């Protein structure tokens, strides 16, 4: 397929869509499917078959408000789209009768989400622009919204050097968490010597409470593939790998389908778009190891080995998969490539702050009213995210902290709610951007207990290669266990702090280096909770179960030692 | 009879004559017996057999010309691979942060107490396996429980327990159906 053919395909698809008087879009991402989205189609199917020419049912990707699914958008021609929440099969039939088929369409008011709601208006959807609007399993739908035009443009009108410099100018930084400038990384791989190079998309989203990559792969798989193909062209690679978690079967299925469809049309594979560029993409399925999100461990896993990290340097840009230069980026980073190529670096760098450009997708979850997937411009304050977009706390509860960055991140308390969300500001608060999980906690959450939760996670997931991480996480967990069950002493707290610094400074990879972060950040802002557990044997949030009074135990031991002596 | 013929063919490839090894052979062929594809082959093996036995690992090692220790090392490194048989039903309780904040721990405790079952273990009668997961990525629906592959969200601990009980009760029914299918 060449460029004119691509354009023809887009026009044809738009023409086809215009024919329908109404398009009903129903979210079929994992969250909505588990709330019963599939049954909607089953219910509507017999009725819609009679209306084939008139109404189209489109299974789409995520619309964002995952906590209120299944979501359904009704788009009557020439009118604003209307989004319904909590759609049951009965409600779907009612919508069909009263809204879609009636002469005077009347939306069912109390189930409609208002378009001017802060949840929608405060968001800037760049990467998720297609999510919830296109059928992820149809290539034509993606092409009709300008899909693969960025690849066509890059192949014809830009040199690999141009592509890298466009990215450098855009100011895009890695969305996996660390925030390394993407353009610089691409340029490094481009300049690296070697005949064979590889492009890898990191979709091993291990952070608990984060599902941005999953949603992007499920809702708009072609965007990820197109971003990877542009990367392949820019760095001179002919082979790409998407590494997906084994826990994401739907994402794997849709990516496979998308790769096949793109290959059939000559948008991937040999001689991409009738140019001299060849690019194949294969999927590698993870097997449930958090440490494989670390780039060197991920590459070991792609090569069929135990996913254990190795010391850097050499960085993957010099020596990665099978010793060849390898470009490795997060899935969300690849999602940013097409808009930058299409609309230019100047446009992209307008969004965001001085040092952090563009948008970031967050999975907003926990004790907020509206939980779901959001995309916000960098520099938005946490208060806007939690209280405007998230709708605030459940009635009767108060905000305590927001946790970003998963087990490597930290908590942000009330007094810092007005900090702008960008790479530097979050780091200064002792947290980090991370991959984008944002978990809101209220006054019923006990902070030492949350620290224990994350430490248990790190302890389980430590690969065991280096001693500080393998042993240190275990000891930190033991100390936290003592604190939360009320049997710790002041000395234990001191020891815990020492151990945190030791593990942070001496571990081999990012997992170990950052594993003490949840403790250090909760100690920084909520030290009084730790002290209450130790001194008063009391959990301020009322979450920990301190039943035994350990003081007695201690007294007994003392008593015994006295007897012995 | 075609069935016996097939058996003979398989017998050439694997002495046990277990037709399921054919699935593994197919996966091996698909990746051209490349050693890098060990994880893919193990995925297929686990899907076909339900869990990984030592024999299975040795077979894969031989086919890929890898030392058995290497294969064992990989199989035990990843949480996804299980070396023990799973129960008739599996109940996966998500313990990701979002679920944890919404009290998924209580769900685990309740099921644990009811079936006197530790997470990661299977009941003595092989009916139920209780597994805890590190985020299944449906955080908007927290707390989330996955029952035999179906995700159920926004659960209270009591609701979840009821569901699991129902599932286990239905177990004997599905077993009877299986028996029926086998005899017919």
Image (spheres, rainbow, N blue to C red):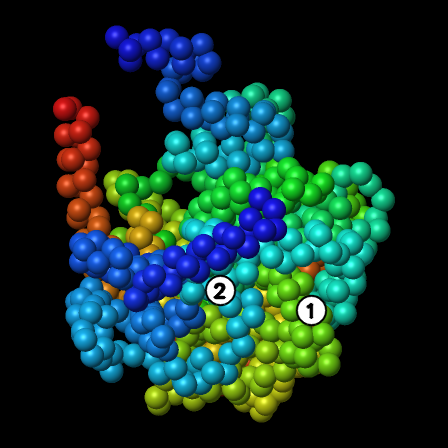
Q: Which residue shows up at 18% across the image and 55% down it?
A: A50
**Mark 1 sits on what residue?**
A344
Q: Nearer the viewer, residue A77 or A219?
A: A77
Instruction: Give the crowd class for mark 1: few <14, some 14-19, many >=20 residues within 10 Å.
Output: some
Q: Which of pointers 2 and 1 indicates the residue nearer the eye?
A: 1
Q: Nearer the viewer, residue B88 or A199?
A: A199
Residue B157 in sight from this viewpoint:
yes
User: Quarter of the image holding residue A223?
Assistant: bottom right
Taking the image as shown, residue A547 lies to the left or right of residue A174, namely left
Q: Which residue shows up at 17% across the image and 46% down it?
A: B170
User: Quarter of the image holding residue B164?
Assistant: bottom left
Circle 1: element type: loop
Q: Nearer the viewer, residue A14 or A528?
A: A14
Where does residue B120 sit, x and y in percent of width and height? 40, 49
Mark 2 and mark 1: Cα distance apart in space: 19 Å
Q: Which mark is residue A130?
A: 2
Taking the image as shown, residue B108 lies to the left or right of residue A551, namely left
Residue A518 in sight from this viewpoint:
no
Q: Nearer the viewer, residue A113 or A53?
A: A53
Q: Which residue shows up at 26% across the image and 53% down it?
A: B115
């Amino acid at each position: 397929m060449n460029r004119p053919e691509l354009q023809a395909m887009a026009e044809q698809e738009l023409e086809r869509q215009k024919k329908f008087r109404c398009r009903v879009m129903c979210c079929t991402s994992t969250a909505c499917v588990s709330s019963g989205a599939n049954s909607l189609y089953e219910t509507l199917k017999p009725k819609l078959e009679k209306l084939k020419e008139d109404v189209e049912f489109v299974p789409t990707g995520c619309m964002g408000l995952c906590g209120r699914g299944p979501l359904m958008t009704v788009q009557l021609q020439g009118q604003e789209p209307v989004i319904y929440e909590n759609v049951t099969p009965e409600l779907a039939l009612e919508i069909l009768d009263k809204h879609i088929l009636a002469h005077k369409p009347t939306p069912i008011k109390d189930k409609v989400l208002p378009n001017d709601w802060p949840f929608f208006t405060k968001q800037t959807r760049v990467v998720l622009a297609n999510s919830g609007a296109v059928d992820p399993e149809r290539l034509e739908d993606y092409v009709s919204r300008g899909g693969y035009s960025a690849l066509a443009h890059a192949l014809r009108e830009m040199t690999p050097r141009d592509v890298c410099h466009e990215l450098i100018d855009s100011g895009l930084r890695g969305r996996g968490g660390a925030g390394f400038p993407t353009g610089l990384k691409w340029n490094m791989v481009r300049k690296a010597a070697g005949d064979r190079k590889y492009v890898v998309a990191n979709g091993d989203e291990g952070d608990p409470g984060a599902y941005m990559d999953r949603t992007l792969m499920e809702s708009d798989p072609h965007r990820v593939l197109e971003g990877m193909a542009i990367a392949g062209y820019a760095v001179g690679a002919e082979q790409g790998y998407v590494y997906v978690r084994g826990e994401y079967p739907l994402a794997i299925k849709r990516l496979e389908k998308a790769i096949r469809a793109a290959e059939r049309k000559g948008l991937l594979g040999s001689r991409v778009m009738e140019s001299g560029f060849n690019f194949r993409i294969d999927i590698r399925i993870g097997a449930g190891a958090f440490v494989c999100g670390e780039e060197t461990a991920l590459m070991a896993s792609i090569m069929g080995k135990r996913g254990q990290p190795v010391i850097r340097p050499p960085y993957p840009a010099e020596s990665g998969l099978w010793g060849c230069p390898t470009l490795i980026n997060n899935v969300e980073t690849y999602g940013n490539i097409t808009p930058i190529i299409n609309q230019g670096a100047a446009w992209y760098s307008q969004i965001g702050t001085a040092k952090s450009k563009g948008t970031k997708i967050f999975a907003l979850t926990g004790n907020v009213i509206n939980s779901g997937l959001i995309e916000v411009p960098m520099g938005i304050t946490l208060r806007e995210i939690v209280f405007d977009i998230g709708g605030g706390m459940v009635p009767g509860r108060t905000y305590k902290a927001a946790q970003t960055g998963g087990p490597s991140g930290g908590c942000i308390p009330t007094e810092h709610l007005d900090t702008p969300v960008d790479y530097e500001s979050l780091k200064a608060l002792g947290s980090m951007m991370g991959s984008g999980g944002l978990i809101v906690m209220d006054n019923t959450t006990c902070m030492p207990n949350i620290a224990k939760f994350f430490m248990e996670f790190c302890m389980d997931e430590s690969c065991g290669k280096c001693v500080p991480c393998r042993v240190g996480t275990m000891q930190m967990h033991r100390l936290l266990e003592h604190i939360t069950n009320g049997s710790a002493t002041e000395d234990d707290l001191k020891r815990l702090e020492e151990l945190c610094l030791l593990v942070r400074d001496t571990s081999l990879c990012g997992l170990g280096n950052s594993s003490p972060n949840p403790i250090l950040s909760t100690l920084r802002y909520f030290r009084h909770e730790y002290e209450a557990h130790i001194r008063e044997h009391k959990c301020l949030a009322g979450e920990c179960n301190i039943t035994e009074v350990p003081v007695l135990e201690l007294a007994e031991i003392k008593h015994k030692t006295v007897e012995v002596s | 009879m075609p069935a016996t013929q097939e058996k003979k063919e398989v017998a050439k490839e694997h002495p046990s004559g277990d037709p399921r090894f054919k699935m593994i052979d197919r996966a091996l062929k698909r990746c051209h017996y490349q050693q890098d594809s060990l994880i893919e082959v193990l995925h297929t093996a686990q899907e076909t057999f339900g869990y990984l036995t030592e024999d299975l690992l040795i077979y894969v090692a031989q086919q890929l010309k890898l030392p058995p220790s290497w294969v064992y090392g990989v199989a035990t490194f990843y949480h996804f691979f299980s070396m023990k048989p799973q129960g008739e039903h599996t109940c996966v309780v998500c313990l990701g942060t979002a679920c944890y904040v919404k009290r998924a721990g209580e769900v685990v405790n309740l099921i644990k107490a009811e079936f006197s079952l530790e997470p990661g273990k299977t009941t003595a009668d092989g009916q139920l396996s209780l597994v805890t997961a590190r985020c299944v990525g449906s955080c908007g629906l927290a707390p989330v429980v996955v029952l035999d592959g179906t995700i159920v969200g926004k659960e209270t601990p009591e609701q979840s327990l009821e569901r699991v009980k129902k599932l286990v009760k239905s177990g004997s029914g599905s077993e009877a159906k299986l028996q029926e299918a086998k005899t017919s």
